[in-house]
Image: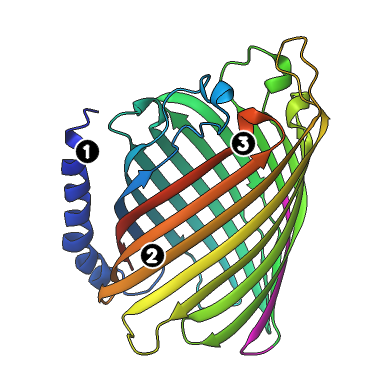
Amino acid sequence: MGKTKVPILMVMLLGLMLAVGQAWGAALSGQNFHIDAAAGIDWDSNVSQQPIKPSAAAQVRGQGDMSYYHNVKLWYNLNPAGPWDLEAKYDYYQNFHPRLSIYDTLMHTFTVKPSYLSGSTMFYLPFSYNFTDVQSDKYSTNFDLSPTVFHRYSQEIGIETSLTLARYYAWTPIAIPEYDRSGRQIGPVLGFYYFYKPGGYIQARVRYDYFAAGGRNNDGSRVHFLVNGVYPLPYHPRFTLNMFVDLGLEPYEHHYFDGTATWFPRRHDTIFNFGSILTYSIYKTLTVNVHYYLTRQASNIPTYDYVRHVVGGQLRFTY
């Protein structure tokens, strides 16, 4: 698709969100069907995740660029008012880069989630399938099963626990077997929620994953600590602030190998993610936001040591 067509496509999508949304809302008043559509523009300082060290950066094409994207989520709840439910969901995402089109991404995700509510406890069994294309070429597919239990102890406090079971297939050409990213993932998640006012909450979550990859370079553990908060501003009811901090420790099992005789230690990454999103409600379920994201990945292997800033805005319609 030509880059000059991207803004036109975004305008057409936003027009569809506004013109069709109210008609769908009247026709689907049973609340079984839901839609979430968004379009936005970002400046990404490091699309290619170019390393900090000059000698490693020279091996990576590109760096920063604009990113135009749109995202549509459609889902249907079979029995939302009952103790049991079956939800089917489709998630479509696509972005375009005017300069670095080799990183244009298209993703489709299909999810089926049976659930059961017993008193204050909800049981979920979501299964999802994702396939991703990059520059119109097949990049990866992923199968994910996450049995989850959420218990609401009170109006303010909730606890969530789950187990992630995933199978990942990477389809990019592999010149060195040690680079093969395909593999299996397993790990538990434990989360705590504090709901302090309508629309506001604080979330704390710890997640451990072990990833057994086809290539020895990618075998390892991942531990992530997340703190996330949503705060409706008291004196400006149309504004909501969402901020999160995520810290990840990712030790790998084997000495890193790049196809040469150079000896490398075991790879060890430390990842810091920060995000800030300020949302304004324009009218009912139509919102606009401005956002900033920071990723700092520190690694003892220079290829994976980088900094990334993303700043932009988004228009979103939900029903």
Q: Name the residue under label 2.
A: 33
Q: State which mark lies toward you, 1 or 2.
A: 1
Give the amino acid at mark 3: Asp
Residue at 45% of width from left, 30% of height from top?
133
Q: In this orientation, does residue 171 appear?
A: no
Give the amino acid at mark 1: Val
Marks 1 and 2, how far apart in space?
29 Å
Looking at the image, residue 3 lies above or below residue 20? above
> Can you tell which mark lies on residue 151?
none
Q: Mark 3 points at which residue?
A: 305
Task: Report if residue 163 lies within the magenta region.
Answer: yes
Q: State which mark lies toward you, 2 or 3.
A: 3
Where the C terminus falls, by quadrant?
A: bottom left
Q: Residues within 10 Å of mark 3 (few under 14, many from 20)?
A: many
Q: Where is residue 284 in the image (x, y as percent from the top left)?
A: 27, 77
Q: In which quarter of the image is residue 288?
A: bottom left
Where the N terminus falls, by quadrant?
A: top left
Compare residues 89 and 272 and report the one nearer the observer.
272
Magenta part of the protein: which range? 154-164
Q: How crowded is mark 2: few (under 14 residues within 10 Å), some or many (20 or more)?
A: some
Q: How crowded is mark 1: few (under 14 residues within 10 Å), some or many (20 or more)?
A: some
Magenta-drawn stretch, dominant element (helix, strand or loop) = strand
Dot 2: element: strand
Marks 2 and 3, how far apart in space?
43 Å
Q: In which quarter of the image is residue 246?
A: bottom right
Looking at the image, residue 78 lies above or below residue 258? below
Q: Name the N-terminal-most of marks 2 and 3.
A: 2
Compare residues 155 and 300 and report the one nearer the observer.
300
Q: State which mark lies toward you, 3 or 1.
A: 3
Compare residues 161 and 258 and report the one nearer the observer.
258
Q: Name the N-terminal-most of marks 3 and 1.
A: 1
